[in-house]
Amino acid sequence: MSIQRTQAIKPSKHPYISVNSSISQGSPVISGTRIRVIDIVIEYDRLGLTPDQILDAHPQLKLEAVHDALSYYYENRDFFDNLIRKKKEIIKKISQKSPSILKKAIG
């Protein structure tokens, strides 16, 4: 009689993160939502919100999902930081071509 060994299924390193080309143009999102990892990162790292404040803004999320999104960011930090930098450059170029109507009105 031989003993069959079964290979344990290794849990996903980021169980709350998914990437699907038909959701948010393939940007990593929190599974089951359209909330992108980059959005959580901007709220946390750039706006200074705590994970609890992020939950207040997105009550459909679990705290574990927010932390998983942040973990995913830190493991892929160069990619996300470059993406944020490129988007800021695009916004700057657009704003230079089309100045803010509100800024003109305020003076």
Image: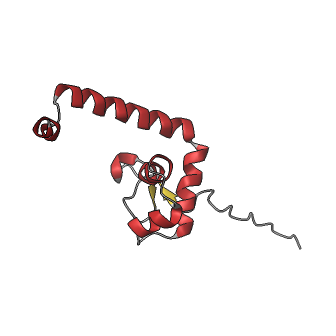
**Name of the residue lying farthest toward the right:** 1
Q: What's the residue at 59%, 53% (across, down)?
A: 71
Q: What's the residue at 10%, 39% (across, down)?
A: 105
Q: State the image quarter where residue 13 is shown.
A: bottom right
The residue nearer to you, when weighing 8 against 17, is: 17
Please indicate whether residue 13 sits to the left or right of residue 86 in the image.
right
Position of the C terminus, as image quadrant, is top left
Q: Position of residue 73 (x, y in %)?
A: 54, 47
Please indicate whether residue 72 sits to the left or right of residue 103 in the image.
right
Please indicate whether residue 99 sits to the left or right of residue 89 in the image.
left
Q: What's the residue at 57%, 67% (across, down)?
A: 64
Is residue 31 positioned above or below 94 on the image? below
Q: State the image quarter where residue 14 is shown.
A: bottom right
Is residue 41 positioned above or below 55 on the image? above
Q: Position of residue 34 (x, y in %)?
A: 36, 59
Is residue 23 positioned above or below 89 on the image? below
Q: Position of residue 17 (x, y in %)?
A: 51, 57
Please indicate whether residue 72 sits to the left or right of residue 21 in the image.
right
Q: Position of residue 40 (x, y in %)?
A: 45, 54
